[in-house]
Image: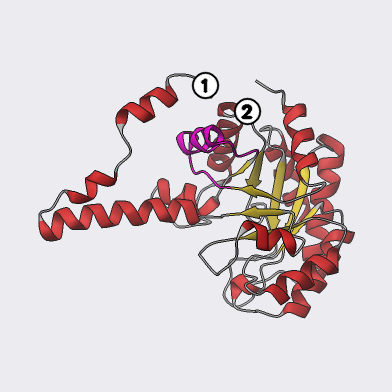
Amino acid sequence: MPTVAAKRAAFRRLHEKGCFVLPNPWDVGTARYLQHLGFAALASTSAGFAFARGHADNAVPRDVVLAHLAELVAATDVPINADFEGGFADDPAGVAANVRLAAATGVAGISIEDSTGRADSPLYPLDLATERVRAARRALDAAAPDVMLVARAECYFVGRPDLDETVMRLRAYAGAGADCLYAPGLATREEIATVVAAVAPKPVNVVMLRPIGFTVADLAALGVRRISLGSALARAAWGEFDRSAREILDHGSFDGLGRAMSSATLNALFRTRT
């Protein structure tokens, strides 16, 4: 099994050129399956993990998330990027302390959001948001400088689809030490190309939460360095689960179970590390 240092070095190399897909498992089984398929790196999903535990997104305690991250790292041979939500603190010092804890799990990257979770003020003021990124960078420089810091501008996600504000925030976060920039919710070629150009040469992550007409090749041509899936795979699994369960309840039909993966296939995979 590769060392933590080797995983982190491999993760940085993935960001240096080209474009790669970073799918988001929500437990050890899905992580190992995605590795088995050949993905070079994975990212946790706060929403997917929360749903699996019967919680809403952003409602899982920090220590439970840290244990989950450590479990994913221990179970896989590929780098893991941590969806670390807002750093589980408002103040920069709290974010720094929590980022150190996240780095200690062995992850190769840590994503920090600038959303507050408060309807009356959904984004941290720019100065505070930037200082939170700077504090995270300092914490990593002191404890785990090989961990990549990903900074997210959540403008589109919180109902403020302002491209100018998004670019302003991402540039500030880049200046504060973020290694990779991320603005979930971008949906057009123009928006994506603008963000890529604005923070170049730093890599940009684009999340594909639903089909919006792009292929991997399309996003690569726009200069996107990595493509994550957020909660999409988890929600796809929930969708199939819901359809099969409702067919049984509403129609007395078990036809949906015919779409299930075989036990033999899964047992063969999980008998050995892959």
Kind of element beneath mark 2: loop
Q: Nearer the viewer, residue 20 or 178?
A: 20
The quadrant holding residue 222 is bottom right
Give the alpha-carbon distance from disc 1 to disc 2, as whole Å: 9 Å
Instruction: Give how far across and how far down residue 99 sits, in percent.
Output: 72, 44
Instruction: Give how far across and how far down residue 201 sits, in percent.
Output: 88, 58
What amino acid does circle 1 point to?
Arg
Q: Residue at x 74, y 39 (%)?
A: 11
Query: Quick check: is 24 in the magenta stretch?
Result: yes
Instruction: Tell whether 163 sits left or right of 40.
Output: right
Q: Which residue is drawn at 39% across and 23% down?
A: 268
Q: Which quadrant: the N terminus?
A: top right
What amino acid does circle 2 point to?
Asp
Q: Residue 273 carries which label?
A: 1
Q: Which colour scheme is used?
A: secondary structure
Height in image: 73 above or below 189?
above
Instruction: Give how far across and how far down residue 53 sits, in percent.
Output: 41, 46
Kind of element beneath mark 1: loop
Furthest residue in direction left, as rendered? 252
Q: Earlier in the sequence, mark 1 or mark 2?
A: 2
Residue receiving disc 2: 77
Query: Do residues under tags 1 and 2 come within 8 Å of each other at their CB atoms?
Result: yes
Q: What stretch is highlighted in magenta?
A: 23-40
The quadrant holding residue 143 is top right
Q: Decide: few, some or many residues near mark 2? Use Cα within 10 Å; few <14, some 14-19, many ≥20.
A: many
Q: Residue 1 carries which label?
A: none
